[in-house]
Amino acid sequence: MSVPAVNLPTGASYDPARVLPGFEHLRRFWDPVQACVTVKVLPGEYYVSAQEEMISTVLGSCVSACIYDPVRGIGGMNHFMLPEPMGGERGSWADTVGRAARYGNDAMEQLINAILKAGGQRANLEVKVFGGGRVLATMTDIGKRNIEFVRRYLGAERLAVRAEDLGDVHPRHVQFFPNTGKARVKQLRGRTDTVLVDGEKQYLKRLANDPIKGEVELF
């Protein structure tokens, strides 16, 4: 699969040939503010890179783990909505080939494995985690469940957590630079907050009614 073309300014250093196999389909665009190519990660997706680019996502009750090897300049980000499948879904679903990284336990495993496959070393891995806001106030606190899960997972795997911005009641826009591990977070309020909450409700409904097929775009 070829990487979709990106309109780059003259002199921009970005090599589509260096996009890692399996990640060609993710959408990319040139960010003039950061002066780099940006890859947008949606719920149920993850992305790993070994070149200078930025990974961006928007989080409500979802959580993203940004994991990177600062020595080798390889890193990535995931975006998950629930810690694990609900009810009796797990058994048959777990055997599905090519399952999406929609749940935390799979999202973490797939991200780490992809970083190691790209040349990262487990002993070097560092982590920054974001999200888990209580934006769905009338529903179960999914954000809290996600926070508890990711902290438990990282502790069990003995991965070094360098930063976290978790909880609260507002959505977040996260920008992550995988080759350096640098991250930026901005809280979102107002109209964006409402749009994101509606999107998360739709996504939860989709997970409950169609737990195996593809993902939906929220933002």
Image: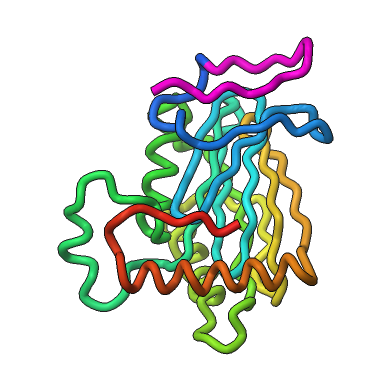
> In this picture, is 95 found above or below 208?
above
> In this picture, is 144 found above or below 23?
below
Write the residue at 68% across / 54% down.
163
- Residue furthest toward the top? 11
Q: Quadrant of the C terminus?
A: bottom right
- Residue furthest toward the bottom? 138
Q: Is residue 2 left or right of residue 179?
A: left
Q: Is residue 47 magenta?
A: no
Q: Quadrant of the N terminus?
A: top left
Write the residue at 66% across / 35% down.
38
Q: Would you say the magenta stretch is mainly helix, strand or loop?
A: loop
User: According to the image, what is the colour scheme of the structure?
Assistant: rainbow
Coordinates of residue 3 in the picture (x, y in percent): 49, 23
Judging depth in this view, the residue of 139 and 111 nearest the camera is 139
> In this picture, is 110 found above or below 180?
below
Instruction: Please state the extent of the stretch shown in magenta in the rendering.
Output: 1-16
Coordinates of residue 21 in the picture (x, y in percent): 40, 25
Q: Quadrant of residue 180?
A: top right
- Number of labels in the image equals 0
Q: Is residue 82 left or right of residue 170?
A: left
Q: Is residue 6 magenta?
A: yes
Q: Is residue 114 left or right of residue 35?
A: left
Write the residue at 52% across / 64% down.
151
Write the residue at 30% across / 64% down.
211
Coordinates of residue 71 in the picture (x, y in percent): 60, 27
> In this picture, is 29 found above or below 10?
below
